[in-house]
Amino acid sequence: MDFGLVLQTDPPASRVVSLMKRAERNGFRYGWTFDSAVLWQEPFVIYSQILAHTQKLTVGPMVTNPGTRTWEVTASTFATLNDMFGNRTVCGIGRGDSAMRVAGRKPNTLARISEAMKVIRALGRGEEADLGGGTVIRFPWIKPGAELPVWMAAYGPKALRMTGEEADGFILQLADLYLTEYMVKAVKDAAAAAGRDPAEVTVCVAAPAYVTADDSPEALAHAREQCRWFGGMVGNHVADLVARYGEHSAAVPDALTDYIKARQGYDYTHHGRSGNPDTRFVPDEIVDRFCVVGPVEKHIEKLNALRELGVDQFAVYDMHDAQEAVIDAYGQHVIPAVNS
């Protein structure tokens, strides 16, 4: 199993670079960041520094979207980094929750994501792409052998199907075992139905991880409080699904939607941060299901279970008060045990 580190691009950028270097030293192979231009610093600028200060780390957004940049600009940025550092980027893409809403726009439609994925992937590989209206372009400066995998984030049935049909990878932002099994199956089934080899779709589960010294009530309570924000972030997407499909819909599992009944709005000022006051509605059960918290042994146990469900990468959301400690614990204990 591969491991990734997910960070927000809070200033100073030098700290983001430092944590990514630390992650690579500890056996992480991917470095991901949020991409929300109003809330955080520009990730692609920081990627150039991460790539320059690491040897093998692959970097990318978790996730970008097709609405905040034109598609040829997104593709050119990835392609430039790959030309400089050797095919070490991946394009994670989704509807755009905070990036679009904070700027006063609605998240992108699935149709727009589908079109964008095709254009960004083709241009990033040096191929021709139709920008619409009969405008077909390619980047004349791309060298042979350029690659740009595009991984799609999804929760709902249509998005899961589209991921299986079109994306190179699937990003699932939660670590619940039941929902992982359910959604990975939906993606793989869609890939097979489209005539693709389901094994060609890389599966990445991303969730907060917090390593405690023991499983005492006090230690677990602190870990849950540090990770509770994640249920609120996921809840934004779940609320959209409930608005579309209704409560207790056969199209969306209750195991995903039931917990947001007590949700009362969301202020993006605290997005993705521990102590977010808008995530108090998230119960401990959801934190335990969606995240990975507890002693090292619990992390190893859950990650082995995820791997059995077809997960190829676990990406650690590292937004809490123990960033270095979690990176080091994974490098010293978790990654060696899972990959032994």
Image (spheres, rainbow, N blue to C red):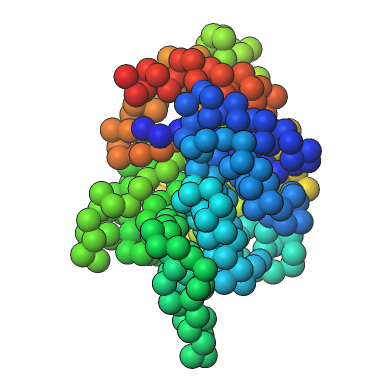
48 relative to 68, above or below? above
What residue is at 38 percent from the left and 42 percent from the top? 180
What residue is at 62 percent from the left and 57 percent from the top? 97
The extreme bottom residue here reads: 134
Residue 16, visible in the rendered structure: yes
- Of the 4 image quadrants, the one containing the C terminus is top left
- Give how far across and how far down residue 310 sits, in percent: 30, 40
- Give how far across and how far down residue 71 sits, in percent: 57, 71
User: In the image shown, does 71 or 103 lie closer to the viewer?
Assistant: 71
User: In the image shown, does 177 or 40 lie closer to the viewer?
Assistant: 40
User: In the image shown, does 125 or 170 lie closer to the viewer?
Assistant: 125
- Of the 4 image quadrants, the one containing the N terminus is top left
Q: Is residue 2 left or right of residue 64?
A: left
232 relative to 65, above or below? above
- Give how far across and how far down residue 35 sits, in percent: 64, 53
66 relative to 266, above or below? below
Residue 239, visible in the rendered structure: no
What residue is at 40 percent from the left and 51 percent from the top? 170
User: In the image shown, does 226 or 61 lie closer to the viewer?
Assistant: 61
307 relative to 299, above or below? below
What residue is at 53 percent from the left and 11 percent from the top? 215
